[in-house]
Every structure is written in C-alpha cells, then in structure tokens.
Amino acid sequence: MSKSPGIPVVVAVVLALLSFPSLAGAEGRLALGLGFGIVDPDVGGGTTYLTGGLRFRLGGGGDDTERERERRDRRGTKEVAADQSAQAWLEAEVGHWDEKDRENDFEIDDLQVGVNILGVFPARRVDYWIGVGFGLHSLDYGLISEPGNQHSEDVLGANLQTGVELNVTPRVGVFGVSRFELLDNDVTSSQLKIFAGLRFKL
C-alpha cells in the first residue's frame, strides 16, 4: 500500500516547529514519548498500535526540571503539594496501525499525524493529564483478494484522551493512555486506543 506523499512532509514540519524552542536550552520543557498498545476500530477487530510524540510545555506552569523535582522530594508533603500547579503541554504525534481481516477479505492501514493540547497535573511521583487533539489520518484500504484495487484517502480526526505517568527517575517516566477518536470517514469512523510506553524528559 502506498502512502500520501504529503504525510512525511507534515510530520517533519510539525516536529521541527515543536523542536525549535529546544535551541534555547529550555530544560524540562521538552519530552519524547514512545508507546505501544492496541487499537479497537469500528472495522475489524483489535490490532497493534505504535505511536511516538514530542511534547513542549507552554507558559510558565510548574517547573519540572530535574533540580526542581529533587528539591520537592526533599521537602514535606504540605510544601510539595503547594508546588503542584497545572501545566499546559503541546504535543506533536505520529501513530500507525494496520489490520488484515482474511475472514472478511478486507485490509486497512492507518498512518496518523496530529497535535494535542494537554492539561497535566503533576504530583510527587505520578502525573495525570487530560487532553484533546486533532490529526490527519492517511488511510489505505480494500479487498485482500484485489491488491490492485485499493483506496487511499486522507481524513480528519479528533480525539479525547486521559493518561497517567509514573516518574521512575527525574528524566524517565512510564505512562499509560486511554483515548477515543472520531474520524470523518465511513470505513472507520471511531477508534479506541489503549497504550503504554516510556517518556524521556529532554
């Protein structure tokens, strides 16, 4: 299956825009996440989902640098709670899944790029977040028995998500996400994604 040539360009532009603030050496404002899980679309059954995302913290918010986390850890519970202010994060992401349903002679491939806005609520060792976002899905689908008669289209999607992250070290976290997406498409109009992974604070 061939992908739309514009998708790699969109990925490169979005990631470059989010990476630009790192040139200023803003410690604690960038985070790279890699995830693996399952997606349950309304076509076919559940299948493997792979994703990667680059986050950039907006505004002042709570300071999440390694030095600040260590300082909070040395203080009492009441003082720690006072430092746990909500943070706004912007995230550029790439995700992919594909499925072959041989019983129904159908296959589909979904490459998605998007942007999410997240509200993160940091705690001493565990962070929680909720967020919304939108993305462009590059879909290829058709009958397995007719490989030369595939359909390709780019469709818009929107998502609502919630997640939790355990800060294993000041620089590394383990996260889990539950996410629901709606797509402007008749073949797959909704997708439920549950995935987990590692996040590296840059």
Image (cartoon, rainbow, N blue to C red):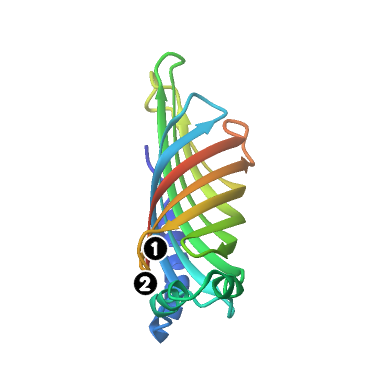
Q: Nearer the viewer, residue 150 or 58?
A: 58
**Where does the image place residue 126, in percent across and percent down from the top left?**
49, 58
Q: Dot 1 lies on which element?
A: strand
Please, which residue is most extreme toward the bottom here? 24
Q: Nearer the viewer, residue 135 or 141?
A: 135
State the CA–CA distance, disc 1 to disc 2: 7 Å
**Would you say 7 lies left or right of 79 here?**
left
Q: Which mark is residue 184?
A: none
Residue occupying image coordinates x 38% and y 41%: 2
Q: Which mark is residue 202?
A: 2
Q: Quadrant where the N terminus lies?
A: top left
Relative to 88, residue 34 above or below: above
Residue occupying image coordinates x 59% and y 72%: 78
> What's the residue type where badge 2 is placed?
Leu
Residue 20 found in image quarter: bottom left
Query: Can I make out residue 104 in this image?
Result: yes
Please say if the residues under marks 1 and 2 sit with CB atoms less than 8 Å apart: yes
Q: Nearer the viewer, residue 159 or 197?
A: 197
Residue occupying image coordinates x 54% and y 43%: 178
Categorize mark 2 by other alpha carbons within 10 Å: few (<14), some (14-19), many (20+). some
Q: Earlier in the sequence, mark 1 or mark 2?
A: 1
**Where does the image place residue 154, in percent across and percent down from the top left?**
54, 46
Query: Can I make out residue 6 in this image?
Result: no
**Where does the image place residue 52, in percent across and percent down from the top left?**
40, 54
Q: Quadrant where the C terminus lies?
A: bottom left
Q: Dot 2 lies on which element?
A: loop
Please, which residue is most extreme toward the top here? 103
Relative to 97, residue 105 above or below: above
Mark 1 = which residue? Answer: 32
> What's the residue type where badge 1 is placed?
Leu
Categorize mark 1 by other alpha carbons within 10 Å: few (<14), some (14-19), many (20+). some
Relative to 25, residue 17 above or below: above
